[in-house]
Amino acid sequence: MRCSKLTALLSLTGSLSCETDNPAIVRVYNGTIIGTHSDTYDQDHFLGVPFAQPPINGLRFRNPQSLNTTFSNNIYQATEYAPACIGYGSGESDLPLSEDCLYLNVIRPSGYENVSLPVGLWIHGGGFTTGGSRMPGYNLSYIVENSVRIGKPIIGVSIAYRLSGWGFLASQQVSGQGQTNIALRDQRLAMHWTKENIGAFGGDAEKITIWGESAGAASVGFQLTAYNGRDDNLFWAAIMQSCNPIFYFSFDVEAAYQPAYDDLVNLTSCSTAIDTLDCLRHADYQIVNDFFNSTAGSNWQPIVDGDFIARWGSQQLAEGAFVHVPIIDGANSDEGTSFSPVGVNTTQDFASDVTELGKVPGEATGYAGASPSLAESFLPELLAAYPDGPEYWIPGVEELGNTTMNDSRGAMYRRSAAYWGDVRIVANRRGTCEAWTARGIEAYSYRFNTRSTGTPVQAGVPHAEEIPYVFNNTRGLSRSTEPVQDQPQSYQELAILMSSTWASFIHDRDPNSWMRTNETSARWPVYELQDPKEIVWDANVTTLSYVEDDTYRAKGIRFILDHAFAYRR
């Protein structure tokens, strides 16, 4: 049948030959898309599919624009990943980069031509400054393959969005023209494109789950609360790994970004232009790129614009102003080791990090410390909420023992790690689950507790450690060391377990539905306000998972949640 489709295309265009190896072909509004078939996974891959007009020339620094033409010759060859959006991190050295980067990828299992499959739409992380959907660690083939194996087949979609200043330029001029948070709008347009076109790929447009990690999970949170929580029927569930609808940074206002914007305007000789933003759209790429890659020009994050981000997330969650769909929301045991400052030797060091903007070394923007004037007023309460005691240390005493001596990061580093992990991620995870549960919406909470090969014991189970297990991608494609190398077979089994659970949730919003009757692993409980429980994923226990009370560091986490306005988020 595929060859007959190809023959029909040949008669129209003469641009292909029937010798093409079993191509995957779909027809969407803009024309025909031709992908490739993977015998390895028994899947059809459609890579580098455009979902927006290229954001170049006059469309640079502008809200994404929908495709408004048919493909050249009515055909689009989607056989390889598109370049990643321009970013500024260590991973970029291995990726082709381009301003023309608004593309998505579709991975579908073969053999389901007459079935509409649920869809998992992946949004990559990277602090809104780095990363890309084409990174090997985000290869969706593994989880899609596993979904078929367990009888819960899904289609995987991964999307791109503009990063750093390319996606979050902010100033009075930007706000005045309504071009704020354009990276989040990139994501929104990709979601609209998926909603409108996924049926052609065999997907069910009514069963799309948005899903991300770190800044990707924060993106999911922003989509859940977008336009003051307006439900545009773009997704039926959401998964957030290590970030939430309450932002991990404190929000800055546009005025905080104005000096950097003005510096860019001056560098590009746009200062005399009547419309400086339009001038920047046509400025020399290298000058703009070099500025965004500098310390002075790398300070770009989402802002509250009264439109896409209508208000602080904590306020919206308190009022129920979010899309009411089931969620998975979790964090890793030792998130704080990825965010805490070092050299924390005394209580004064700890207090200074909290009140003096709380910047983490190496990061250009944002802070999860309260504003200094407010923090000083409740500093004694904060210090009491985060004592220097073993019950708060991260990593815990079971990892490093009941001592803080001889730690090069500082005698109170583990106290600091507890706070910074909570204030960035863990407290907001608990608060999100509470907000969902209070509205009668199903929430499933987790703690990932498996340290992979190559991760120092002092780091515990840090940020992003769970990704290979969720994707069932344990071949080391996203890190220098294979995560399960020289580990017991239980590590690989945990990856299969978690990947199956995620696929099950994407398939029917029930993470337990795939389990066989003789399954020995714990069943994942729905979160409850009166008796909050979460599942723990741990390759070092016989069952690979168990259920625990979500009550640890209760005083500290409650302090953070109760002072959300002081944290400006």
Image (cartoon, rainbow, N blue to C red):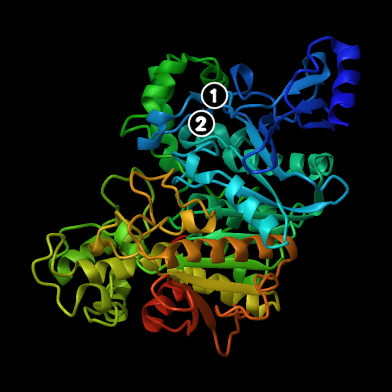
**Residue 409: in sight, yes or no?**
yes
**Residue shown at 39%/36% (left/top)?**
91
Label 2 with label 1: CB-CB less than 8 Å: yes
The amino acid on which the numbered mark 2 sits, given as a three-letter code, is Trp
Which picture quadrant has residue 179? top right
Camera-near label (2 vs 1) is 1
Give whichever of discs 2 and 1 has the lower sequence position.
1
| Whether residue 158 is situated above or below residue 551 in the rendered picture | above
Query: Residue 474: image x %, image y %?
Result: 46, 52
Residue linked to disc 2: 166
Residue linked to disc 1: 99
The quarter of the image holding the N terminus is top right
The amino acid on which the numbered mark 1 sits, given as a three-letter code, is Glu
**Residue shown at 66%/26% (left/top)?**
79
Q: How many marks?
A: 2
What's the CA distance linking mark 2 and mark 1? 8 Å
Residue 471 appears left or right of 193: left
Query: Residue 72: image x %, image y %?
Result: 78, 15
Q: Secondary structure at mark 1?
A: loop
Which picture quadrant has residue 70? top right
Residue 519 or residue 303, whichever sits in front: 519
| Whether residue 545 is situated above or below residue 477 in the rendered picture | below
